[in-house]
Image (cartoon, rainbow, N blue to C red):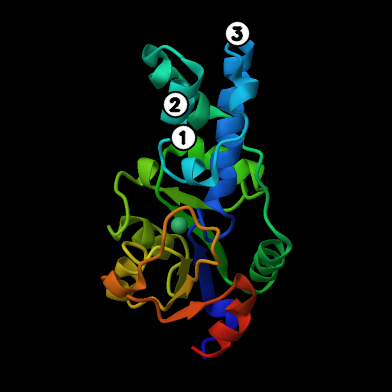
Amino acid sequence: MPNLNDICLVFDLDDTLYKEIDYVRSGIAAVLAQLDRLGFSAKSARVLSEQELRSGRAIDVLIAKLNVPPTMHESLIWVYRLHHPNIGLDDTAKEILHWAESFCAGLAIITDGRSFTQRQKLHALGLGHIPAFISAEVGVTKPDQRAFLAVQKLWPSKVYVYVADNPAKDFIAPRDLGWPSFGILDDGRNSHAQNLKIAPAQPTKWLHSLAELPDALNSL
Ligand SMILES: [Mg+2]
């Protein structure tokens, strides 16, 4: 087992450190508030079904329900992408990040998404101080290795561990670079279903919660 102070712990963001569905709820609330301000009686649509929220088409559903001109679609998408998210870390994530900051050689985030949107999330979660490698800034999305290589460059000659949730893309670069990795299993709240059977690369181990991470690192 490597010493903890030789390990760089690298986390994915969405559905790993917090649940992305919380971001969707927050974004839709911002869109509804904006529609209210513009005179659409958005209150009548306050309750979107869970299925509508998770459909990836929540804004389309709102536009149809409220008779919003379809030409506003693009603007409402940007209201969603640019809003200040009302999201937070749960106690387990807070404890694990605090533990990692205290004992590990490095702590970083590798996440796919727009720069502004992902940085708004990081700021809202109180993670703005952690080095973050965001696909829009790196220029490539996972499974490209470039963000992972940037972490290796920032903290040379360490043991790197990636913690993430998406079996379709998250564990390919770690496998190819020889990083151990841990997958956080969906507890039923993830916004995208985890299909473990078609994973192109499996993590070293699947965990039920971030709370299992210290023991998992011990077992490397
Ligand atoms: Mg994720």
200 and 72: which is toward the camera: 72
Say which of 156 and 171 sits in front: 171
Circle 3 sits on which residue? 39
Q: Give the structural element (helix, strand or loop) at label 3.
A: loop
Report the residue marked by disc 2.
77
Q: In this view, does 24 lie above or below 210?
A: above
The amino acid beneath tag 2 is Ile
- Judged by depth in the image, the label closer to the viewer, 1 or 2, is 1
- Tell me if residue 158 can be seen: no
Image coordinates for residue 50, horizontal then vertical, percent: 54, 46
Q: Residue 187 in the image: x percent, y percent?
A: 56, 67
The tag earlier along the polypeptide, 1 or 2, is 1
- Are dots 3 and 2 in contact, CB under 8 Å? no
Amino acid type at image mark 1: Ala
What amino acid type is highlighted by mark number 3? Gly
Residue drawn at 45 percent across, 69 percent down: 162
Regarding residue 188, the answer to whether it shows in the image is yes
Q: Quadrant of residue 30?
A: top right
The Cα–Cα distance between marks 3 and 2, rounded to whole angstroms, is: 18 Å
Instruction: First in sequence, mark 1 or 3: give its number.
Output: 3
Q: Residue 67's spot in the image, x, y percent?
A: 46, 15
Precedes in sequence: disc 3 or disc 2: 3
